[in-house]
Image (cartoon, rainbow, N blue to C red):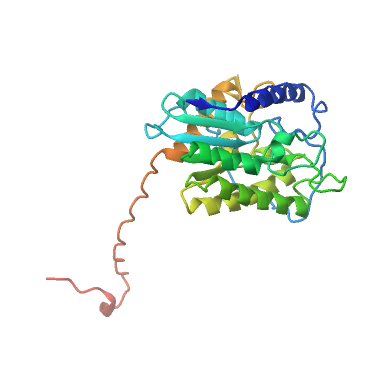
Amino acid sequence: MITESSQMVGRRLVAAVLAALCGASATACSGAGQDPYGTGLLHGPGRGVPAQDRPLGTGTPPFGQETLDPAVHGKKILVVGDSWAASIGTGMAAVAARTNTVVNAGLGGCGIMQANTPDASPDCRDWQEKWARYVTEHRPDAVLLMTAQWDLAPQRIDDSARLRDAADPLYRKLFADNLAHGARILSAGGARVFLMNSKATANPSYRDRALVLNEEIYAAAARQARSGGGLLDLRAQLCNDNGCPFDRDGQAVYDETGHPAPAVRDRLATWALNAMFAPKPAAPKSAAPKPAAPRPDAPLSAVPAAKH
């Protein structure tokens, strides 16, 4: 089952047009933040920027998973956030809607900052009320929250005319506060909340901002892990320590709008659903340590006595 409001459909149509423009020209949607690395304008280091993200190794990224686990059955999933969230939600519907309910409330151009910018839609600013209503109406088992692509963009977050980005301490604090508040709203009905990080650390123009957002996302995800939620590491699915490949087995990873191409999108959705609901393999039991063999030069008193 797929559930979405008519307002979401109209909003998504507008977002698709804007995303297409952004895909064709980075200057067509300045600050849109929706190509594979985002499309913001401000560069340069900020205060308190982490030195690096988590190491991934140099192997080929998995680009999600192919097979949906049987445990993903009869579940209700709510998806909220930006157009990347909406894309993953579309993939979830494609791979799992026959036996599950997917409420895809992701909206293109909508972050969690309640930005006071001319291009910020009013639809984005009342996310607190909307999310609370979705939770009450649908009673999801799990929620996917992702705004880490759109919120890379510089935004006006207060009454001043100044554009701020994630390297700004005020922006960072508001992002962290809103993330925590959003997670509380989404988990109010008992749902487990999962957060996705940004893959934009591979792009020099976005690296600092993505590192800051990811650090806050990791902290929020760690808190959610205490109640069964946690982190969905999108970056580890699409990137390695050398960057984020643009093709997989000769096929494009991203579509013309900069979002995951359908095949990759569906694999990412499958991986996310499995991470939410599939049983985790039990940790292997460690064997009892064997007593150390005596050294040849050990004194007789140090050699364990044989048991009879």
Rendered location of residue 294, percent (x, y): 29, 69
Which residue lies most toward the bottom here? 301
Rendered location of residue 241, percent (x, y): 62, 40
In-front residue for pair 121/288: 121
Which residue lies most toward the left here? 308
Q: Is residue 245 above or below residue 163?
A: above
Please tell me which residue is depicted at 54% across the width and 53% down the height of the picture: 222
Please tell me which residue is depicted at 88% across the width and 45% down the height of the picture: 161
Q: Is residue 215 above or below residue 196?
A: below
In-front residue for pair 48/290: 48
Residue 118 occupies quadrant:
top right
Rendered location of residue 168, percent (x, y): 78, 51
Rendered location of residue 71, percent (x, y): 38, 35
Q: Quadrant of the C terminus?
A: bottom left
In this view of the protein, can residue 241 be seen by the observer? no
Please tell me which residue is depicted at 56% across the width and 26% down the height of the picture: 90
Residue 257 occupies quadrant:
top right
For the image, the number of numbered tags is 0
Residue 203 occupies quadrant:
top right
Please tell me which residue is depicted at 71% across the width and 54% down the height of the picture: 173
Q: Is residue 53 above or below residue 200?
A: below
Left or right of 20 in this view: 286: left
Left or right of 253 in this view: 224: left
Which residue lies most toward the right here? 161
In this view of the protein, can residue 302 be seen by the observer? yes
